[in-house]
Image: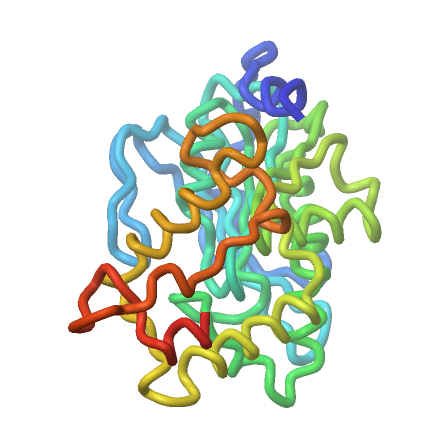
Amino acid sequence: MKKLTSLLFIAGCAMAATQNCEDLAHLNISHTSITAAESKPAGDFNTPQGPAIHNLPAFCRVAGSIKPSSDSDIRFEVWLPASGWNGKFQGIGNGGYAGTIGYTGLANAVTHGYATASTDTGHSEAAGVTAAWALHHKEKITDFGYRAIHETAVTAKAVIHAFYGQDAKRSYFNSCSNGGRQALMEAQRFPGDYDGIIAGAPANYWTHLLSTAVYDSKALLSEQASYIPAEKLPAIEAAALAACDANDGVKDGVIEDPRQCKFDPAVLLCTGHENKSCLTQHQIAAL
């Protein structure tokens, strides 16, 4: 992992574009429409979500939509360094239910000399925390599940070749959480897409993860008395650390293996007036 992470930030021989950025708007790629191809000067970039990204190098921004099915609308962006390309491609994943382009990841990669790409995985949902888009949309579920990341990789490589006149010499995928799950899906289903993959904190046991989320919500929200407000979380954290921090032989503020933590929330039972440092019996039962 450390070796691969290091490789991601070691630039090779710098290469420049052989194609005009704006001409990429006319690229003919299977089931793909290019909606924007524009040269961006060095400096700031205002994302559609609002916050600006600062101190970027000059790059070529290509945006478009991929439609492998009649119900697909996989939006993507490819960012290509205008100069100083390190000859490599880095794919960027998504957290949560995706729904947006990963602009922060794109900015980080292009700043380090990578041609890079990200996708919303086929639906638009700014917060990335709901799945209403999936109801009655089997093809969109497929796009989110694995197809969008693969299609974006294929399309990005075609854009890279058109812009630089050559293929990327190495391709990497780097993401975590749902992006880690995407990484594992790439490795399993499309091993030829990337030479190296970083699957950070992969949320890959999807059925069980969602079942657990429903169970947790039911335990904490089924009745008002069970709800634990945010102001009580520091007390819970402190009690859990006191019980389990030293289990690995090092008291460093980290519980190495939560599965081995035998923390009993009953130690926080309120003995008098309820306050932010204690829990009620209902809250203890929920926790």
Q: Quadrant of the C terminus?
A: bottom left
**Residue 8, percent across and down?**
59, 23
Is residue 10 placed above or below 105 in the rendered structure?
above
Residue farthest to the top? Answer: 13
Query: In this figure, what is the number of numbered marks?
Result: 0
- For the point 34% across and 47% down, the residue is 238
Q: Is residue 219 left or right of residue 93?
A: left
Is residue 1 placed above or below 235 in the rendered structure?
above
Quarter of the view holding residue 165: top right
Q: Is residue 72 left or right of residue 270?
A: right
Residue situated in front as seen by the camera: 28 or 194: 194
Residue situated in front as seen by the camera: 282 or 230: 282
**Residue 163, percent across and down?**
58, 33
Q: Is residue 40 left or right of residue 187?
A: left
Query: Which of the colour schemes (rainbow, by chain, secondary structure, one colour) is used?
Result: rainbow
- For the point 50% across and 43% down, the residue is 244
Quarter of the view holding residue 172: top right
Q: Is residue 28 visible?
A: no
**Residue 131, percent across and down?**
53, 77
Is residue 209 placed above or below 55 in the rendered structure?
below
- For the point 32% across and 87% down, the residue is 224
Q: Quadrant of the N terminus?
A: top right
Q: Is residue 135 visible?
A: yes
Residue farthest to the front? Answer: 271
Q: Is residue 33 left or right of residue 278?
A: right
**Residue 232, percent across and down?**
27, 62
